Amino acid sequence: MNLIQSTVLNNLPTGKKKTPSGWISFNAPCCIHNGESADKRKRGGVMTNTDGGVSYHCFNCGYKTSFIPGRKLSFKFKKLLGWFNISDTEIKKLAIEALKLEGENFEYEKKIKINFLKKTLPKNTHKLDIWLEKYVAKDLTEVQYTKIDQLLAYLNARGTNPAWYDFMYSPSFEFDFNQRVIVPFFWKGDIVGFTGRMFTDNKKVKYYTDVQPGYVFNMDAQNWNRKFVIVTEGPFDAIAINGISILGSEVNDIQTQLINDLGKRVIVVPDKDKPGEKLIDQAIENRWSVAFPKWHNEVADVADAVLKYGRLFTMQSILKNTESNKLKINLRRKMNG
């Protein structure tokens, strides 16, 4: 463990706990600095990596940042250190330490290989196709029939065709999985995580997500002849148009590398909210294009657009309203604001 990793771990907020997925969760300090109310549900997470890196993800306000050995401390990572009440003097020392690591690993960035570990899905998880076969064969309990009906009704309400993705379901009561549609995360054919979206109408947490730092959703589906890739915030948005999702509103360094490595024109479609504004800033920083499709006010994201207009029109409206020039992007965002 290097100095940067140990300093971060030693300065995490009180009340932290380690999750089964390897994240250390705590009340995120970033939310109040990003226009959100203070986090009281331990939505902030840190994970240290065996290569010497550190990843941070807030599942409340969407703030993401990371330290990768071989690179300097980013501005966003330094801000996070400050929010952990680490002094400016100590942050400067860590910046110097990063430079030392950069010198030791000067070829690291060129040779870096991004990979994700296989993960286990919740107990008794099966593909939705299998559950539907049992549904037709009348080989389910009365409760299971009800849950599958609710799951299908939820997908239908979102305008999502069950055939568009390998959706799954588990009858497990752990973390209310019996009330969630499971969206597995694939990487080179392996399952490396998942998110479970609540499909019943209750006040419980909508998403239960097990995701590894730097993961980009739906990358396995991008091996076609398209000259562009569409980046969305949520997985259901990506599924709706065969795009990819950053699973939030901020892109970290690993995600940026993965997306750029596709070698395609990158088109970002931000949600119409404050986090979406942050994503536009990052798109400009990464020299990516941004789409400002002309949708009705009640259409908040790509999935809503597909539900209202259909897939073809939604894709056309994205491609016809895409800007690549920084000045034009900022002009369009002001017009839309």
Image (cartoon, helix red, strand yellow):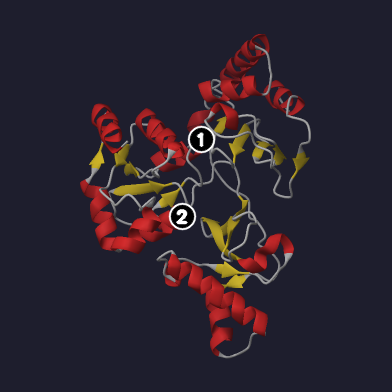
Residue furthest to the bottom: 137
Tag 1 residue? 252
As rendered, which of 297 and 97 lies closer to the eye? 297
- Front-lying residue, 220 or 302: 302
Question: Can you see residue 49?
Answer: no
Circle on res. 218: 2
In the rendered image of this protein, does residue 213 appear above or below residue 160?
above
Query: Residue 233 placed where, x, y %?
Result: 45, 46
Residue at the spot 64% in from the left edge and 79% down from the top edge: 144
Q: Is 187 above or below relative to 259?
A: below
Query: What amino acid is found at the position of numbered circle 2 in the picture?
Result: Asn
| Res 122 → quadrant | bottom right
- Is label 2 in contact with label 1 (beta carbons under 8 Å)? no
Which amino acid is tagged 1?
Answer: Asn
Q: Secondary structure at mark 1?
A: loop
Q: Which quadrant is the N terminus positioned in?
A: top right
Disc 2 element: loop
Mark 2, Cα crowd under 10 Å, few <14 / some 14-19 / many 20+, is: many
Q: Quadrant of residue 258?
A: top left
Whether residue 237 is visible: yes
Towards the viewer: 229 or 31? 31
Q: CA distance from mark 2 to mark 1?
A: 17 Å
Residue 181 picture location, percent across and down: 57, 65
Which quadrant holds the C terminus?
top left
Residue 56 lies, in percent from the top left, at 61, 34
Drawn side of residue 110 relative to residue 304, left or right: right
Q: Is residue 139 left or right of residue 129?
A: right
**Residue at x 66% of width, y 69% of height:** 178
Between disc 2 and disc 1, whose residue precedes?
Answer: 2
Where is residue 217 drawn, in percent x and y?
A: 49, 51
Instruction: Tell me what residue is drawn at x 58 percent, y 79 percent.
Output: 131
> In the depicted view, which residue is nearer to us: 305 or 130?
305
